[in-house]
Every structure is written in structure tokens, then in C-alpha cells.
Image: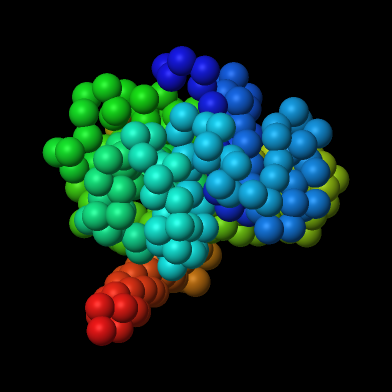
Amino acid sequence: MMSNKSVAIIGAGTMGSAVAVALKNNGYSVVATRRSVEKLDDLKTMGMEVTSDNREAIVKSDAIIFSLKPAETVVQIQQMQGELKGKLVISICASLPLSKLESLLPESTVIRAMTNVASRVGGGFTAYSITEKVSEEGEKQALDILRCFGEVEKIEERYMDALTPISGSGPAYIFTVIEAMVYAGLKVGLPRELALRASYQTILGSAKLVAESGDSLSALKETVITPGGVTIEALYELEDSRITTAFMKAIEAAADKAKKSSLEFLNNLEETETKGTH
């Protein structure tokens, strides 16, 4: 790991705060920034330094994580290129390509990553991309940080937009499923806390079984189904509501939104840069 393990989180909103907590829990010294610094009181209580001064945070840190909107990230990087020189810079901003990041920071180690809010408890899935400019040591330092968030996988950058609605947005779908299971438990007479524990632990256990068994999803589902039993009755109702199609349509719509947002940002960025040259 890095010598003194200090990381600045530039833009500690929901996602930035989640990764800040994960890093703090893994022994990193964290400086978190936000315009409304009073909204970071929970991070301060955990022993993190909080500030509204991005420059100050960057100067005192070895690694920088940008968790801002892409256009704002570009502006911040442009304003602090000198302070970022020679440092590890990780962007978890949607739509901001490595090519742009590296053009702004030719003398820094630049990583593009995408994670989700489950990183707060070390349960996230983080995909990252690099170019050939990143050294083996630079990638290792980035992995030390990213592994604090949970599972990590290196991917081709072209998959980032498609992965965002599955992994990045995915926790919201799972929260919806858990909520539906809890409401169903209440409807059939379970106490609320029991319905909640049973629902989230069932999902945790099922996910663990998928990860560790090596069996297909269809095979695993078949192990729960018995002829004329309770499970097949429930599955019949789920299929009648076209739940699989609903999930597929939802994720496809989110993927289209991510792609459009990315194109819109890149077009706006190009127009801004073109005007700046005249």
C-alpha cells in the first residue's frame, strides 16, 4: 500500500461518503470534501477530516478520488493540475472517459472506476479500467484502494456505460425486492423486524450460493421447487406479472439513459473546448 495511505474524496455526497467510510474502515487517512461541509458531520464523527477546500485536500493526500458530476470534475482538475501532478487519481464519475482524464493529467496515474453504495460496508462491486500508460505499481496502488469497497474486476472501458445500470444502480433494485418481500411478510402476519431479517438474509445467502456453488441459476432455482409446492405457486404468480421482462426493460432503459447522458456530456465538452480555442 501507499506509504501513509492518505486519500482525498473530492465530492463526498452519497457515493463519495460510501467510499470514504470503506477507506476509513480499512485504515486509510481520509479527507472528504463537500461545499456544504456541515453535511459531513457523520464522517467527521468517524475521525475523518472534512473540508470545503478541494485544493487543501488534494495537497495533503497521496491519492485522489473524484466523485463529482463529470463536468465539475473536469473543471476541478483543470484548476488543480499542478497539485494533482504525480498523484494517483481515481475517477468514479459517470461518462468521463479515460482519454479526457489522461489528457488533463499527463503526469498522473489515472484510473476510471465504477462502484455502488454497498461499498460502504465492503460489499460493493467495483469495475475499473486503465490504459497502457498506468504502471504495474500504479495499478497495484489503485487496487489496494478499490478492494476496500468489495469485489473488484478489471474491464474494458467500453463496458462501463452498460455495467452502470446493473452494478451502479443495482442496489436500488435489490432494495425494492427486499421491501416487497417485507410487505408480503407483513401481509401474511409476520412481525416487521422478522420479515426484514428473513428477507435480507435470504438474499444475502442466495447471492453467496450463486457466487460459490458454480451451478447455473436455473439449476439452483430447481433445487427449491417441488411439484405442487409453495415455491412453484409463487413463481407462477411472478411470471404472470412478467417480472423478468420488467427487470430487463428497466435495466435496458437505464442503460439507454446512461449512454445518452454520456454522449450529451461528451458533446457539451467538445463544444466548450471548441469555443475555448477561438
Q: Specify how the rendered protein is coloured.
A: rainbow
Spot the residue most to the left.
Answer: 132
Which of the pair 192/264 is nearer the observer? 264
Residue at point 54%, 27% (across, down) = 6
Q: Is residue 9 above or below residue 189?
A: above
Residue 54: percent from the left, percent from the top?
A: 58, 49
Residue 129: percent from the left, percent from the top?
A: 27, 44
Q: Is there any visible trace of residue 121 in the rendered image?
A: no
Q: Is residue 16 above or below residue 261?
A: above
In what quadrant of the picture does the N terminus appear? top left
Residue at point 57%, 24% (across, down) = 28
How many numbered marks have been drawn onto this rendered protein structure? 0
Q: Is residue 81 above or below residue 143?
A: below
Which of the pair 84/114 is nearer the observer? 84
Q: Is there any visible trace of residue 137 in the rendered image?
A: yes
Residue 53: percent from the left, percent from the top?
A: 64, 49
Q: As drawn, is 2 to the left or to the right of 108?
A: right
In what quadrant of the picture does the C terminus appear? bottom left
Which of the pair 275/28 is nearer the observer? 275
Residue 268: percent from the left, percent from the top?
A: 34, 79
Image quadrant of residue 158? bottom left
Residue at point 41%, 24% (across, down) = 144
Q: As drawn, is 6 to the left or to the right of 106?
A: right
Q: As drawn, is 179 to the left or to the right of 238?
A: right
Residue at point 45%, 51% (across, down) = 80
